[in-house]
Amino acid sequence: MTKCIQITEDEFQATYPLVPNHIETNASWTYGDGPGCLFETYGEELDFVRRQDPRTVWTLTDHPDDENKELVQSGFHLVNRLGYLISAVPFPENTHIEVVIEFETDLDYVNADECDCAPADKDE
Protein backbone atom coordinates (compact mmCIF):
# COMPACT_ATOMS: atom_id res chain seq x y z
CA MET A 1 0.00 0.00 0.00
CA THR A 2 1.31 3.45 -0.94
CA LYS A 3 1.54 6.08 1.78
CA CYS A 4 0.58 9.61 0.62
CA ILE A 5 1.96 12.67 2.40
CA GLN A 6 2.17 16.41 1.79
CA ILE A 7 5.20 18.46 2.77
CA THR A 8 5.95 22.16 2.53
CA GLU A 9 8.28 23.68 -0.03
CA ASP A 10 10.79 24.41 2.77
CA GLU A 11 10.65 20.77 3.95
CA PHE A 12 11.12 19.62 0.35
CA GLN A 13 14.15 21.87 -0.12
CA ALA A 14 15.72 20.74 3.19
CA THR A 15 15.03 17.01 2.77
CA TYR A 16 15.48 16.49 -0.97
CA PRO A 17 18.28 18.76 -2.28
CA LEU A 18 18.02 19.13 -6.04
CA VAL A 19 20.56 18.29 -8.73
CA PRO A 20 21.28 21.27 -11.01
CA ASN A 21 20.40 20.97 -14.68
CA HIS A 22 23.83 20.61 -16.30
CA ILE A 23 22.36 20.47 -19.82
CA GLU A 24 20.54 23.83 -19.90
CA THR A 25 22.45 26.65 -18.20
CA ASN A 26 19.34 28.86 -18.14
CA ALA A 27 17.04 26.30 -16.50
CA SER A 28 14.45 27.58 -14.04
CA TRP A 29 13.78 26.51 -10.44
CA THR A 30 16.70 28.14 -8.71
CA TYR A 31 17.50 28.67 -5.05
CA GLY A 32 19.01 32.08 -4.50
CA ASP A 33 21.69 32.72 -7.10
CA GLY A 34 22.28 29.00 -7.69
CA PRO A 35 21.89 27.14 -10.98
CA GLY A 36 18.48 26.07 -12.27
CA CYS A 37 17.27 22.57 -11.49
CA LEU A 38 14.22 22.07 -13.73
CA PHE A 39 14.58 19.61 -16.61
CA GLU A 40 12.44 19.81 -19.76
CA THR A 41 9.87 17.21 -20.83
CA TYR A 42 11.55 16.40 -24.14
CA GLY A 43 14.87 15.80 -25.86
CA GLU A 44 18.24 15.38 -24.16
CA GLU A 45 16.91 16.60 -20.80
CA LEU A 46 14.09 14.04 -20.76
CA ASP A 47 16.55 11.31 -21.75
CA PHE A 48 18.72 12.28 -18.77
CA VAL A 49 15.71 12.22 -16.39
CA ARG A 50 14.70 8.75 -17.58
CA ARG A 51 18.18 7.39 -16.79
CA GLN A 52 17.96 8.45 -13.12
CA ASP A 53 16.91 6.35 -10.13
CA PRO A 54 13.08 6.55 -10.29
CA ARG A 55 12.96 7.42 -6.58
CA THR A 56 14.93 10.62 -7.24
CA VAL A 57 12.61 11.92 -9.98
CA TRP A 58 9.97 14.54 -9.17
CA THR A 59 7.38 15.96 -11.58
CA LEU A 60 6.27 19.59 -11.56
CA THR A 61 2.62 19.76 -12.67
CA ASP A 62 -0.24 22.20 -12.83
CA HIS A 63 -2.29 22.06 -9.63
CA PRO A 64 -5.57 20.31 -10.47
CA ASP A 65 -7.72 22.61 -8.31
CA ASP A 66 -6.03 26.02 -8.30
CA GLU A 67 -4.55 27.98 -11.19
CA ASN A 68 -2.41 30.01 -8.75
CA LYS A 69 -0.53 26.93 -7.60
CA GLU A 70 1.66 24.18 -8.97
CA LEU A 71 2.35 20.75 -7.56
CA VAL A 72 5.59 18.81 -7.22
CA GLN A 73 4.90 15.07 -7.05
CA SER A 74 7.33 12.30 -6.34
CA GLY A 75 7.88 10.06 -9.33
CA PHE A 76 7.69 10.31 -13.10
CA HIS A 77 4.28 11.55 -14.28
CA LEU A 78 3.01 12.51 -17.73
CA VAL A 79 -0.34 14.25 -17.13
CA ASN A 80 -0.11 18.06 -16.80
CA ARG A 81 3.68 17.91 -16.47
CA LEU A 82 5.62 21.15 -16.70
CA GLY A 83 9.07 19.71 -16.04
CA TYR A 84 11.12 17.36 -13.91
CA LEU A 85 13.36 17.74 -10.87
CA ILE A 86 16.02 15.29 -9.71
CA SER A 87 16.83 15.03 -6.00
CA ALA A 88 20.17 13.92 -4.59
CA VAL A 89 18.25 11.94 -1.94
CA PRO A 90 15.66 9.30 -2.95
CA PHE A 91 12.17 9.45 -1.50
CA PRO A 92 11.01 6.40 0.52
CA GLU A 93 9.63 3.35 -1.28
CA ASN A 94 5.83 2.99 -1.35
CA THR A 95 5.43 6.70 -0.64
CA HIS A 96 3.80 9.39 -2.76
CA ILE A 97 4.86 12.89 -1.72
CA GLU A 98 3.20 16.12 -2.84
CA VAL A 99 4.49 19.66 -2.44
CA VAL A 100 2.09 22.52 -3.15
CA ILE A 101 3.86 25.50 -4.72
CA GLU A 102 1.97 28.77 -4.34
CA PHE A 103 2.70 31.66 -6.69
CA GLU A 104 3.64 34.96 -5.15
CA THR A 105 1.44 37.72 -6.50
CA ASP A 106 2.24 41.41 -6.58
CA LEU A 107 -1.06 43.05 -5.68
CA ASP A 108 0.51 46.51 -5.52
CA TYR A 109 1.29 46.59 -9.23
CA VAL A 110 -1.43 48.00 -11.45
CA ASN A 111 -0.93 49.10 -15.02
CA ALA A 112 -2.23 52.68 -15.09
CA ASP A 113 -3.46 52.24 -18.68
CA GLU A 114 -5.75 49.39 -17.59
CA CYS A 115 -7.13 51.02 -14.43
CA ASP A 116 -10.62 52.53 -14.49
CA CYS A 117 -10.18 54.08 -11.05
CA ALA A 118 -9.90 57.80 -10.49
CA PRO A 119 -6.53 58.93 -9.15
CA ALA A 120 -6.37 59.23 -5.37
CA ASP A 121 -6.58 62.72 -3.93
CA LYS A 122 -3.07 63.63 -2.74
CA ASP A 123 -4.44 65.28 0.42
CA GLU A 124 -6.01 62.06 1.68
Image (spheres, helix red, strand yellow):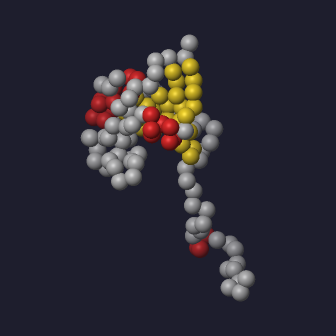
* Residue drawn at x 42%, y 34% as measured from the top left: 16
- Residue most extreme to the right: 124
Q: Is residue 122 above or below residue 22?
A: below
Name of the residue lying farthest toward the front = 14
Question: Most extreme residue toward the bottom, as rendered?
Answer: 123
Viewer-closest of 38 and 4: 4
Check the image and name the residue furthest to the top: 1
Q: Position of residue 36 (x, y in %)?
A: 35, 46
Q: In the visual, does 96 lie left or right of 66? A: left
Q: Is residue 35 above or below residue 73?
A: below
Quarter of the figure with residue 21: top left
Which quadrant holds residue 117? bottom right
**Foreground of the two, 14 or 51:** 14
Does 58 appear above or below 53? below
Quick check: can you spot residue 58? yes
Percent across and percent down for residue 3 are 56, 19
Q: Is residue 54 left or right of residue 124?
A: left
* 111 left or right, relative to 117: left
Taking the spot 34% from the left edge, 49% from the top edge, the residue there is 34
Residue drawn at x 40%, y 48% as measured from the top left: 31
Q: Nearer the viewer, residue 3 or 36?
A: 3
Tell me, yes or no, if residue 71 can be seen here: no
Q: Where residue 30 appears, x then y in whole percent?
A: 39, 48
> Looking at the picture, how far across and down is residue 9, in whole percent?
51, 41
